Amino acid sequence: MFEQEGNRERIAAVTGASGAIGMAIARQLAAVPGHDVVLVCRNEDKAIRCVQDISRTTGNSRVSTVRLTLSKPRNRSTVSSLYY
């Protein structure tokens, strides 16, 4: 979870969010006011469906996705660099 400096809003990056456990975690985080939730997934089509479902069920429009394969070492720092 990333906390923006001087701000109480938080950004939660959830890996594997197109799977059952990751999606459940992303949904719970999205339901908390003030959270931006980023679904980190390999499959963009599944991720988009998950974003739509989570946004609809939680009312949080600040749910997005980034397509990454974290098994590649160069991609591991990409998520945090997007927000800092």
Image (spheres, helix red, strand yellow):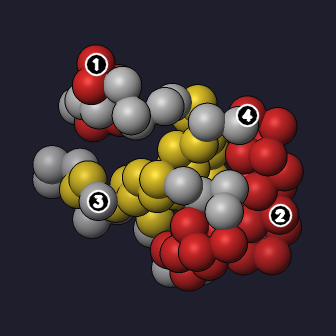
Task: Please say if 60 is above or below 31.
Answer: above
According to the picture, the residue beneath numbered tag 3 turns out to be 1
Sequence-earlier tag: 3 or 4:
3
Report the front residue among 31 and 75: 75
Q: CA distance from mark 3 to mark 4?
A: 22 Å
Report the front residue among 27 and 55: 27
The numbered dot on residue 53 is 2
- Give the image location of residue 63, x and y in percent: 62, 53
Residue 59 sits in quarter = bottom right
Residue type at mark 3 is Met
User: Left or right: where does residue 5 sit relative to residue 65?
Assistant: left
The residue shown at (58%, 75%) is 21
User: Left or right: where does residue 77 sit relative to residue 37?
Assistant: left
Residue type at mark 1 is Arg
Sequence-earlier tag: 4 or 2:
4
Task: Please say if 61 is above or below 59.
Answer: above
Q: CA distance from mark 2 to mark 1?
A: 30 Å
- Give the image location of residue 51, x and y in percent: 73, 53
The numbered dot on residue 74 is 1
Report the front residue among 77 and 30: 77
Q: CA distance from mark 3 to mark 1?
A: 20 Å
